[in-house]
């Protein structure tokens, strides 16, 4: 699995954490969690696209997959 940029994950976590610092290990776990979520999102969206007899994931497939995973 490709790694998401650590700096992006750190920035996103820091934005939501306010004045609380974030450890390096926490950022690594955040990257792993985000990658896992995106993989599941992609799998679900692909399944939805296949169900509509398409070979391309469309925005509405991703939106539907997102609602299923939340």
Image (spheres, rainbow, N blue to C red):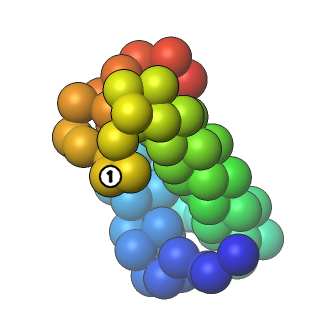
Q: Residue at x 49, y 70 (%)?
A: 10
Question: Residue lying farthest front?
Answer: 53
Q: Is residue 54 left or right of residue 6?
A: left
Q: In the rendered view, tell whether residue 54 sits above or below residue 32.
A: above
- The one nearer the camera, 13 or 35, is 35
| Residue 44 visible (yes or no) | yes
Q: Quadrant of residue 27?
A: bottom right
Picture coordinates of residue 55 (x, y %)?
Answer: 38, 51
Horizontal and vertical percent position of residue 56: 32, 52
Residue highlighted by disc 1: 56
> Residue 40 at x, y = what percent?
63, 43
Query: In the visual, does 11 lie left or right of 33?
Result: left
Helix, strand or loop for disc 1: loop
Q: Residue at 61% of width from left, 80% of height from top? A: 3
Report the front residue among 36 and 18.
36
The residue located at (49%, 43%) in the rendering is: 46
Position of 11 compared to 1: left or right? left
Residue 37 visible here: no
Q: Is residue 47 above or below residue 2?
A: above
- Residue at position x 53%, y 76% from top? 4
Indicate the quadrant containing the N terminus: top left, top right, bottom left or bottom right. Answer: bottom right
Q: Residue furthest left?
A: 59
């Amino acid at each position: 699995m490709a790694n998401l940029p650590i700096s992006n994950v750190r920035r996103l976590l820091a934005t939501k954490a306010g004045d609380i610092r974030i450890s390096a290990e926490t950022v690594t776990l955040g990257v792993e969690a985000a990658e896992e979520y995106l993989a599941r999102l992609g799998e679900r969206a692909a399944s939805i696209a296949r169900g509509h007899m398409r070979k391309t994931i469309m925005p509405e497939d991703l939106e539907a997959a997102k609602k299923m995973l939340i």
